[in-house]
Amino acid sequence: MTTKQSSGVSRRILVSTLALAPALIGPLRPQLARAQSDPLPSWNDGATKQSIINFVARVTTQGGTDFVPEAERIAVFDNDGTLWIEQPMYVQFAFVFDRVKVLAPQNPDWKTKQPFKAILDGDMKALAASGEKGLVELIAATHSGMTVDEFTKIVSDWLATARDPRFKKPYTELVYQPMLEVLAYLRANGFKTFIVSGGGIEFMRPWTEKVYGIPPEQVVGSSGVVKYELRDGKPVLVKEAKVEFIDDGPGKPVGINRFIGRRPVLAFGNSDGDQQMLEWTQGGPGARLMMLVHHDDAAREFAYDRADKLQQFNVGWDEAKARGWTVVSMKDDWKTIFPVVRN
């Protein structure tokens, strides 16, 4: 999102403070795109689904005019709202709120000190009034002062027990089944899949491989400063309350260049915060595919776009029309939203 919009400002505040299928033998991969009877079973048949299948066939067909060598088959995906749920608040925000409540007994002054008091009282109006300064304080209190390994365990333990307020399920079960199929389909055809998200990199890395099949080294996100120390003779990395890199909006192409080193041929997002990532992807030579998930299914998930206060899809919508990007309708293009989890 752009900083000219109020919702964009809120997103920038968040990301700045968060600083959040086996491969087949090479020669078989080009044929796989055509040979699979239905590689995307949770997608309704139609132009949107076919555009993905056609693109993969084009770039994996040896000798074709749009053929892309395997090393250059880079696909990037936003996380919040693209791969998993982001309403009624970012999952990492829910983590921050819960951490404040856990740490409150060790900080009795929080009962009367904002913005901590607002969270403990459930007063979202007072929290909003605390603005950027309040959010910085919250992140500093919940994301710093511990080692990277300690933070990884805190995140993992929280995800194991936290539940979404509407669906009453673990957040890691509220990932989008159609997108899981896209990830697997691309990897089966020689693509390397990356997350490029405004969320905290150390919040995502503990679980993305298990949930998405994307290993931690293929996660690009906003990051805070970490400092090397020896503690009792043991080397550790300690998280500090300082922003290092903001991976949102125009920061996404910068992050792709810095951490991936190749321009993607496919990019998937869902909001104005992904605009520059899709522009950067489209700007390269040869075949490219740019897609945006439109949340238009209030019955099965949520419906929001231009006027949403948290995650606006406004400029991106206009850009999609002007640049020929594909907009995915949750309501019309997806047979199902979430995976069926059998315990």
Image (spheres, rainbow, N blue to C red):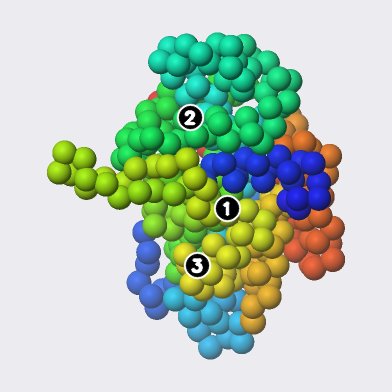
Mark 3 secondary-structure assignment: helix
Residue type, numbered disc 2: Ala
Q: Nearer the viewer, residue 69 or 162?
A: 162
Separation of marks 3 and 2 at Cα, in angstroms: 29 Å
Residue where numbered disc 1 is placed? 246
Disc 3: which residue: 258
Q: Residue at 40% of width from left, 15% of height from top?
A: 106
The answer to whether 341 is drawn above or below residue 44 in the figure is: above
Front residue of 50 and 175? 175
**Mark 2 or mark 1: whose residue is earlier in sequence:** 2
Whole-number angstrom distance, CA of label 1 to CA of label 3 = 12 Å
3 vs 2, front mark: 2
Q: Is residue 238 left or right of residue 85?
A: left
Q: Amino acid at mark 1?
A: Ile
Say what amino acid the circle numbered 3 marks. Arg
Q: Which residue is mark 2?
A: 141
Rendered location of residue 1, percent (x, y): 73, 51
Q: Secondary structure at mark 2?
A: helix
